[in-house]
Image (tube, grey):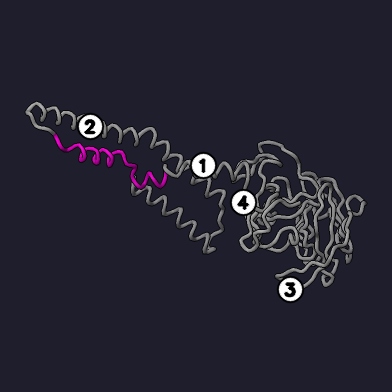
Amino acid sequence: MQALTAAVLAAFVAYAGAWYLEMVEGNFALLLFLATVVTGVYWIAERVYFLPKRRAAAAELDAQAEARRASLAAQGIRSGDGKDVAEARGRLLMQPWWLDWTAGLFPVICAVFILRSFLFEPFKIPSGSMIPTLLVGDLILVNKYTYGLRLPVVNTKLTEGTPPARGDVMVFRYPPKPSLDYIKRVVGVPGDEVAYLNKRLTINGQPISKAPLKEYFEEDAMRYFKHFEEQLGTHKHRILNDDDRPAFVPGVEEFQFKQNCRYSVEGVTCRVPAGHYFVMGDNRDNSLDSRYWGFVPDRNIVGRAFFIWMNFGNFRRVGSFD
């Protein structure tokens, strides 16, 4: 078992190392699921076989020590090996390293797996597409149950939950490459006609409120951008516009239901198909979103982002957001 366990642990370490070095495309959900299953098997084996076996050996040692003490007492000799017996008993009951690194870790790994799969999952914001709402380096929490519970790895929905609403900040699997997680704001729900023309958002023919704010200084770009407050449904949030970027959408990819969209020099108008969502970044002129690669299918949804739990460069960022 030692050799088998060493090989299993080495395989996990090799996979994690290759992932870190970008030699393979990692899947943390799958890795955590496999770790839970493997350590769970060891945990069950420990409870039903290895631990009872060690306890039986310790009981046999106790019986042998008691018989020895009785024999010596009959000869009028007082036994002085109590400490040695206790140490030997402790060694027999001690969990070997290969069980300590498997069965011993199962409760923690299982708790993390359940928490991450069905309740809350942490993410790190890698890009500036959601500035000014979310900044690069923000560590956020995503609610995994509001939109319905889903099986880990395969993402199959178990419960319906509440459908995403306009204005929600949503994490989803990037449709052109589902192994990547993206975060954007839900702009259009199934059946909506979303128009973004001349940098003005309209939904079902109704212009979305857009109130000007003081210019926003973006530290990474070292420049100022036009800054607005927009309201989608019950969500009031801020957006940025860059006057140096044109209104038309360059480099549009081929995607499913592209026929639902009309592109022009003014921008784009799309009818959102059933079971899909139209998403955009709050940094409107610096966001690769539904305007470029299409709609987010319901099966790709991960959860609703709602809280910044840490930003090591700016502790004041901690808190909820809209």
The residue positioned 28% from the left and 40% from the top of the image is 90
Task: Give the x, y percent position of residue 309.
Answer: 64, 53
Q: Mark number for residue 195?
A: none
Q: Can residue 254 be seen in this view?
A: no
Left or right of 249: which side holds 98? left
The mark that comes first in sequence, 3 or 4, is 4
Task: Give the x, y percent position of residue 139.
Answer: 64, 56
> Whole-Å distance between the Cαs marked 2 and 3?
75 Å
User: Is residue 91 within the magenta segment?
Assistant: yes
The secondary structure type at the circle numbered 4 is strand
The residue positioned 84% from the left and 58% from the top of the image is 229
Q: Mark number for residue 222?
A: 3
Q: Which amino acid does label 1 sit on?
A: Cys
* Closer mark to the observer between disc 1 and disc 3: 3
The secondary structure type at the circle numbered 1 is helix
Q: Mark 2 points at which residue?
A: 62
Q: Name the residue under label 1.
A: 110
- Numbered range of the magenta stretch: 79-102
> Whole-Å distance between the Cαs marked 2 and 4?
50 Å
